[in-house]
Amino acid sequence: MDRAKSFGIIRTVTALLIAFAAAFALIALISKTPLESIRVFALRPFESKRYFGNIIENAIPLIFSGLAMSVLFQTNLFNLGGEGVFYISGALIAPAAIFISLPSGVHQSALIVLGALVGATVMLIPGFIRAKYNGSELVTSLMLNNMLLGAGLFLLTGKLRDPLAGAQISYLFEKTSLLPVIVPGTRIHAGLVIALVCAALVYIFLYKTKWGYMLRMTGINASFAKYSGINTFAVILMAHILAGLLFGMGSAVENIGMHKRFEWSGLPGYGFDGCAIAMLAGSNPAGVIGVALFVGYLRIGADMAARLADVPTEMISVLQSLILLLISAERFLYHFRQRWIEKGAPKGVRK
C-alpha cells in the first residue's frame, strides 16, 4: 500500500476517534449516569446474538446504497436520487408482493429484479439530462425525489392501504414473497448474501473490467477521457443505470426482508446514508461493507442508549455529521499528509 492510501486510512481513523471523543463528551454533559450511558452505547450491541443481529440487519440496505453512491462518486457524479428510487421501487414491488402468488424462490427473485429495473429506469432520467445537456444531476435528482414520493404515496393511499391496519401501510405481503431468515434467533435474512455478492461484483466491475476503467477515468478527468476516445455519454448513463439497479435491489431486499407490508410513508433516508457511507469508504466497494456495519453499530448503540439510559437518539446524527465534516474537509490533517508522503519518498526526491 502506498503512503498516500495509508494516510487516508489514518485520516479516517483519526476523524472517527475525534468524533467518538466528542460524542462521549456530549454524553457526559447531558447524562445523569454518563459512564453507564457510554457503556450501553459502546458495548451493549455486542452483548447478545439478537443485538448483534440488529447491527447486520441495519447494515444490509446501507451496503446497497453505499455501493450505488460509490459507483456515482467514482464517475465524479453527485446524484442524491437514491432517496426517491428507494421509495418508488418499494412502492412498485408492493402490488406484486401483495396480489401475485408465485412459488417461493421465484417470487422473491422476481421482486428483486423488478425493484432493480424500476431503480435503473428512474435513475436514467437525471443521468440522461446530465449526459445529453450537462444538467446538474444534483438538482434534477433532488427535484425527482419529491415527485417520486408523491407518486408512491398516491399508490399507497389509493390502491394498497389496508383499511383494517389503523395506519398508512399496505396489505400484507404474500408469504412466498418474503426473504428467509438465515441466522436463527435474529432477523438476518438472505438479503445479506445478496448484498455481499453485489459488493464483490461491483468491485470486480470497477477495478477488473474495461468498463469500470472507463468509468473511473471519466470521473478523474472527463475531458481527457473523451479526448482519449471514451464515450463519456455512455459512461454517464452506465453509471446511473448501475446505481439505479443497486438502489432498486436494496429497496426490494429491505422491504421483503425486514417488513411484511409496505410501510414507508416518507422517504426512508437510505439515499443520503449511502452518500455518507461511500464518502467514509473512499468510494471503495470493499470498504462499503465495513462502513455500513459500523454505521449500523452506531445506530443500534444510540437506540439502546436512548431506551436503556437517558441519551437522546439525535446524538447519532451529531456523531455522523461530525465524522462527515472531518472526512470531507480537504485541509483536515493536510500538513501531516505532506510530511507523511515525503517521509516515504526516495531521498533524491525529498524536499
Image (cartoon, rainbow, N blue to C red):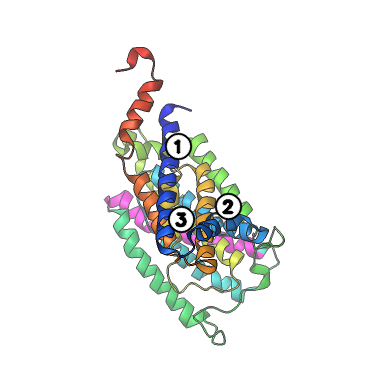
* Relative to 39, residue 228 above or below: above
From the image, tell me which residue sits under label 1. 9
| Numbered disc 3: secondary structure | helix
| Side of 341 where 286 appears, left or right | right
Q: Which mark is residue 195?
A: 2
Alpha carbons under labels 3 and 2: distance apart: 15 Å
Residue that sits furthest to the bottom in the current view: 164
Residue 234's spot in the image, x, y percent? Answer: 39, 45
Q: Earlier in the sequence, mark 3 or mark 1?
A: 1
Q: Position of residue 248 (x, y in %)?
A: 50, 59
Q: Amino acid at mark 3?
A: Gly
Which residue position is annotated with label 3? Answer: 244
Residue 5 appears at what percent x and percent y? 43, 32
Query: Counting residues from the N terminus, which is met first, the one under dot 2 or under dot 1?
Result: 1
Is residue 256 among the parts visible in the rendering? yes
Image quarter of residue 148: bottom left
* Image quadrant containing the C terminus: top left
Stretch in magenta: 107-135
Q: Position of residue 193 (x, y in %)?
A: 63, 52
Q: Is residue 249 visible?
A: no
Q: Amino acid at mark 1?
A: Ile
Q: CA distance from mark 2 to mark 1?
A: 24 Å
Q: Quadrant of residue 2?
A: top left
Q: Nearer the viewer, residue 338 or 253?
A: 338
**Which amino acid, mark 2?**
Ala
Tell me which residue sits at (29%, 39%) in the image: 331
Q: Residue at x 42, y 67 (%)?
A: 267
